[in-house]
Image (cartoon, rainbow, N blue to C red):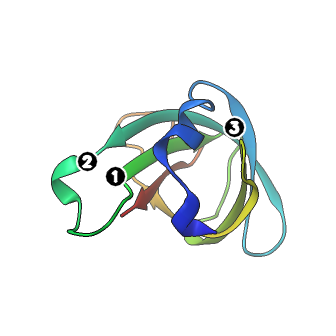
């Protein structure tokens, strides 16, 4: 299922809120902030354009990284998405900031 995920699935979510299901089964409300395609990272014979997604939690969380589940338009529940936390770097330290890379 992960190979089917394309940047346009996230395009529809930009600026919107959703729910990230964490590895422990709990749910974290999130806001999708940005989407960036990275064409220079494309591997030969790979149909998918590499891209990354950044989002933040809408409440404090201790979650750092792991395999999560996210509801995506057209695909439904997509499991085993590896989510990584990134530093707040001057942003609100009361919420978590996260990154997903699709190569």
Taking the image as shown, residue 24 lies to the left or right of residue 2, namely right
Q: Quadrant of residue 21?
A: bottom right
| Cα distance in 3D space between marks 3 and 1 | 29 Å
User: Can residue 64 be seen at all in this image of the molecule?
Assistant: no
Taking the image as shown, residue 92 lies to the left or right of residue 69, namely left
Q: Which residue is mark 2?
A: 38
Residue sitting at the far left: 40
Q: From what the image shows, is residue 94 above or below residue 24?
A: above
Residue 76 at what x, y percent from top left? 78, 53
Which element is circle 3 on?
Answer: loop
Residue shown at 35% from the left, 39% from the top: 36
Nearer the N terminus, badge 2 or badge 1? Answer: 2
Residue 49: give its label: 1
Crowd tier of the residue under label 1, counting other residues whose Cα lies within 10 Å: few below 14, some 14–19, many 20 or above: some
Residue 15: give its label: none
Crowd tier of the residue under label 3, counting other residues whose Cα lies within 10 Å: few below 14, some 14–19, many 20 or above: some
Residue shown at 64% from the left, 62% from the top: 62
Residue shown at 67% from the left, 55% from the top: 61
Q: Nearer the viewer, residue 94 or 56?
A: 56
Residue 11 at what x, y percent from top left? 53, 32
Residue 58: give its label: 3
Question: Does the residue at mark 2 contact the one at mark 1 (Cβ under 8 Å)?
Answer: yes
Crowd tier of the residue under label 2, counting other residues whose Cα lies within 10 Å: few below 14, some 14–19, many 20 or above: some
> Disc 3 vs disc 2: which is toward the camera?
2
Quadrant in which the C terminus is drawn: bottom left
Which element is circle 2 on?
Answer: loop
């Amino acid at each position: 299922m992960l190979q089917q995920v394309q940047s346009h699935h996230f395009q529809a979510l930009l600026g919107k809120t959703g729910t990230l299901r964490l590895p422990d089964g709990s749910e974290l409300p999130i806001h999708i902030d940005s989407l960036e395609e990275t064409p220079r990272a494309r591997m030969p014979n790979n149909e998918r354009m590499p891209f990354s997604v950044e989002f933040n939690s809408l409440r404090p969380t201790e979650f750092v990284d792991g395999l999560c589940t996210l509801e995506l338009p057209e695909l439904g529940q997509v499991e085993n998405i590896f989510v990584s936390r990134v530093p707040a770097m001057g942003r609100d330290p009361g919420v978590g900031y996260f990154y997903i890379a699709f190569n």
